[in-house]
Image: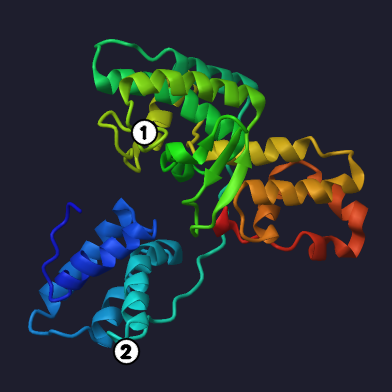
Amino acid sequence: MSRVFKSFLAPTIANDFIPFQIASGRWSNSYEKNLSYFDRHCFENYSQMHVLTQEMVDSWCIKRTTETNRSRLDRTGVVRAFIRYLQSRNLTDVDFPEMPTAQTSLYIPHAFTEAELDNFFRACDELPVKPNSMVVLTRKLIVPVIFRLLYSSGIRTTEARLLRTVDVDLDEGVLNIRQSKGYDQHYVALHSTMVSLLRKYENAICVLHPDREFFFPSFRGNMMHTEWVAKNFHKLWYKYNTDIAVSYELRHNYAVENINQWIGLGFDFFSKFVYLSKSMGHKRLQSTRYYYHLVPAMADILLKLTGPDFDWIVPEVDYEEG
């Protein structure tokens, strides 16, 4: 924990709540940052208070003029978790204010071309090995592998970053995703070519980090920072490509490429739909429907096959779970 908490809540936050969240696998740099902002809000505006009040929470959670519903939810989420923690131990009777749902996203992911992907992975493979430092050598080993894993498995960037060595079964070719969006555990079966690449990577990375906990460690051997994947993708993507793209779109590409293969299979798509949803860690089948809208003519084909039952079989999407 790098931040210093100053309000009357500091002992409870630092000594009780944060260790509990870490032990539960529900902690991140963004959580710590937003909780420290709430702590500062209490310290600066309620310095004479010694008990959490409804006014403190409500004044923090009020929507700011520059915020969307989504960013407001992100900012206040850790405070909601903190209040639940206190309520469950009868330490407060404060309620978290009712929050609106996030607006439906109109975002359309970038559609990768084969040439763009070839360019990107070529850039990954061209990373230098000099200077001969732990930073350079660790990055050289990890980058070509982690991005191919994202591309071939559809796992979230955070899931890859938080993978522990004990959760990667290279004998069976299965990932155990313990820390996911919403913290729902699920399993991902890997393609044999990806398993082969991971085995080679494992042999090489063990030389640099023999006692590592995380499958993809930082150069210091611990967990990589949140921004690591996005920054490396950005730098390597624009080495040869010009269209705008982000690392998370490799997950979208995985879903769309799978769905593209289903066209013409008739009702076999129902079982494949379930497999895809589970593999991608969606809690509800509704969330997987989003990807149908990214595949040309797929929604029309499904509607033609199922008629009025289409919305029952493939309900409307909740994009925020993607």
Where is residue 3 drawn, in percent x and y?
A: 16, 56
Disc 2 residue type? Asp
Secondary-structure class at tag 1: helix
| Whether residue 307 is situated above or below residue 165 in the rendered picture | below
| Whether residue 179 is situated above or below residue 316 in the rendered picture | above
Number of callouts = 2
Q: In terms of depth relative to the viewer, which is nearer, 35 or 75?
A: 35
Q: In terms of depth relative to the viewer, which is nearer, 76 or 78?
A: 78
Q: Residue at x 57, y 32 (%)?
A: 151
Q: Is residue 198 at all visible to an observer of this figure?
A: yes
- Is residue 267 shown left or right of residue 189? right
The residue lying furthest to the bottom in this view is: 93
Q: Residue at x 54, y 27 (%)?
A: 148
Where is residue 66 drawn, in percent x and y?
A: 34, 63
- Is residue 26 shown left or right of residue 29? right
Give the number of the disc on residue 93: 2
| Whether residue 145 is situated above or below residue 54 in the rendered picture | above
Disc 1 residue type? Lys
| Disc 1 + disc 2, Cβ < 8 Å | no
Residue annotated with mark 1? 231
Where is residue 80 drawn, in percent x and y?
A: 36, 73
Of the numbered discs 1 and 2, the one sitting upstream in the chain is 2
Scheme of image coloration: rainbow
Image quarter for residue 60? bottom left
Camera-near label (1 vs 2) is 2
Q: Residue at x 15, y 70 (%)?
A: 10
CA distance separating discs 1 and 2: 42 Å
Image quarter for residue 133? top left
